Amino acid sequence: MRYSKQRELIYGIIKATSTHPTANWIYQAAREKMATISLGTVYRNLDQLALEGMIKVISEGNIARYDWNTVSHQHLRCSVCGKMSDIEIPDRQLIKSIKHSHQFDVEKIEMIFMGICSEHN
Amino acid sequence: MRYSKQRELIYGIIKATSTHPTANWIYQAAREKMATISLGTVYRNLDQLALEGMIKVISEGNIARYDWNTVSHQHLRCSVCGKMSDIEIPDRQLIKSIKHSHQFDVEKIEMIFMGICSEHN
DNA sequence: ATTTATATAGTAATGATTCCTATTACTTAT
DNA sequence: ATAAGTAATAGGAATCATTACTATATAAAT
């Protein structure tokens, strides 16, 4: 993966927000800095950044979201305001017990907790 | 929601499999029994069945899957064979601790454990 | 049986994502 | 510094899942 200013721009945009943006949101933000950037470039770079482990992909409700926070964490999604926030869930014990009970080697966990956030209950 | 033989057919197809099928898979299966059924009908009925709590929707990797098993459970997804299987995860304690730590009322949990199943490790 | 309202088939439209290709721009060797 | 080689880009077309639209059909209520 060699350097490109498009990728630097895209990565910078992701790192500067905590809104877990979609590809299209990132594309719109990128266009304000570089008018000619294309949506395909955004997708390709998101894929590559994810492949290199520099960002995380969250797939929920048939639309991908991207997250600069790559340390193991999960998400709370408020059904009122739609906001997605981070939460750390200890999973060592869980992974171990799944290995025992199902002989399944867990490599990646994606949890989404849907409900009502503190501002809307 | 009034009776229709299309819905009965669709529900029957879902109940008869444990493959966590996609809408298209269900549509193909339905067409073998009723040649004129339309994809829109499949989607509409899946939505309605989910709304009534008769089936569960699993959204993973930008494609929805449907599950007749509506009791709380989660999924293991094998990255080799793609098979998705069920697992029960006790979540009472987890919900309670999220309420405490984040003042967030969890209503629904979706967990996907990606890794290697017992047949491929 | 008639009326009323909901469901359907068929098709068009949308939205997210991927694919394609000619062009551009890093990188490396000269 | 220049040229060659390779990877990345822009722009647009194609694909796939899902939703929307509309005229017709069918279940339910009277």
Image (cartoon, coloured by chain):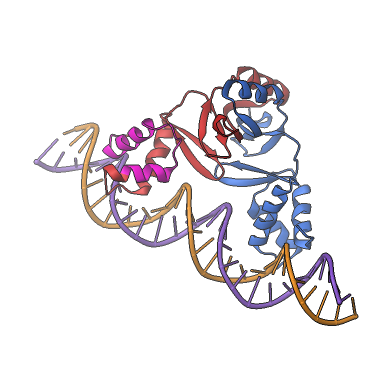
Chain colours: A blue, B red, C purple, D orange
Is B4 located above or below residue B40 in the figure? above
Q: How many marks?
A: 0
Left or right: A39 as drawn, with respect to C19: right
| Near-viewer residue (A3 or C12) | A3
Q: Position of residue A64 (x, y in %)?
A: 61, 47
Left or right: A43 as drawn, with respect to A5: left
Q: Position of residue A52 (x, y in %)?
A: 74, 48
Instruction: Identify the image quadrant of the N terminus of chain B.
Output: top left
Is A110 located above or below residue C23 in the figure? above
Magenta stretch, main secondary structure class: helix
Q: Residue at x 40, y 36 (%)?
A: B48
Magenta stretch contains residue B21: yes
- Residue B87 picture quarter: top right
| Near-viewer residue (A54 or A17) | A54
Q: Position of residue A75 (x, y in %)?
A: 66, 34
Q: Residue at x 35, y 34 (%)?
A: B11
- Residue B54 picture quarter: top left
Start-end of magenta stretch: B2-30
Q: Residue at x 27, y 49 (%)?
A: B36
Is A106 located above or below residue C4 in the figure? above
